Amino acid sequence: MIIHRVEQNTSDWLKLHVGIPTASGLSQLVDGDFEFRKGEMPRTYLHKKLAEKYRGQPLITLGSSGSFSTDQGMILEEEAVPWFILEYETPVDRVGFITTDDEGFGCSPDGLLVGKECGLELKAPAAHTHVKYLIEGRLPPEYAAQVYGSMFVTGFKEWIFCSYRRGFPPFKLTIQRDETIMQKIAIALARFHANFALGFAQLQSYNHEDSDGQ
């Protein structure tokens, strides 16, 4: 893995996302069984990544999220991460972005546990969502691809999912690496990159057509 020492939610951090799939977007490529999705969703994700690569810049801009997302980010940064460090007496390395050695897939963990092969996915959701996590007692399906995708990027054996909400007990769960899921992610990424190479070659062909016509 390659650790990129940038601050999350900055322009430098966004640039590292250009043209590559990420753990947070992996659910757009695979379904709940980690099989490659059918339909429009994976095609749209591919087209977004092709557009980024062609332009050489991210399509999203900073500050475009809604107010709850902004508040959630502030809670994570100012309260939840320091709480986790103190509550579990666990030092956390706040890295910005991590890619695989070939830089073809990346993730933005909320931290890496110092001295351990373990990462951290920390959420500060709405109260009713936090209660749902406590009642169900499992890794929320909507974050499964992100958690396992992050383990794929880093090669780590474990990942902690933790939900924090003031006035409620925390929900903390340690997820173990699953090699069958890792193999499925590898297959999905290989398919994405094959489609990406074909799509980018087609985009570039339009430049040649323009030059031939001049």
Image (spheres, rainbow, N blue to C red):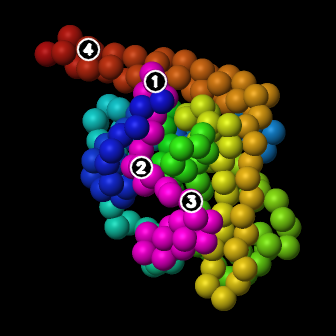
Q: Quadrant of the C terminus?
A: top left
Q: Which residue is mark 4?
A: 208
| In the image: residue 159, left or right of residue 51 | right
Q: CA distance from mark 3 to mark 4?
A: 55 Å
Q: Which residue is mark 1?
A: 101
4 lies above or below 85: above
Q: In the rendered structure, are the residues bearing label 3 and label 4 in contact, judged by CB atoms less than 8 Å apart?
A: no
Q: Image point 28% across, 36% down: which residue?
A: 55
| Crowding at mark 1 (Cα within 10 Å: few <14, some 14-19, many 20+) | few
Q: Image point 68% across, 43% down: which residue?
A: 158
Q: Nearer the viewer, mark 3 or mark 4?
A: 3
Where is residue 206 shown, x and y percent of the image? 31, 21
Q: Which residue is mark 2?
A: 95
The three-letter amino acid code for the residue at tag 3 is Thr
Magenta stretch in the rendered image:
75-104
Q: CA distance from mark 2 to mark 4?
A: 41 Å
Q: Image point 62% across, 36% down: which residue?
A: 156
Q: Image point 43% across, 75% down: which residue?
A: 78
Q: Is residue 82 visible?
A: yes
Where is residue 212 shown, x and y percent of the image? 20, 11
Q: Earlier in the sequence, mark 1 or mark 2?
A: 2
| Crowding at mark 3 (Cα within 10 Å: few <14, some 14-19, many 20+) | some
Where is residue 130 shown, x and y percent of the image? 71, 75
| In the image: residue 69, left or right of residue 176 | left
Residue 148 falls in image quadrant: top right
Q: Nearer the viewer, mark 1 or mark 2?
A: 2
Q: Is residue 11 magenta?
A: no
Q: Earlier in the sequence, mark 3 or mark 4?
A: 3
Q: Earlier in the sequence, mark 3 or mark 1?
A: 3
Using the image as rendered, state which of residue 166 and residue 68 is in the foreground.
Answer: 166
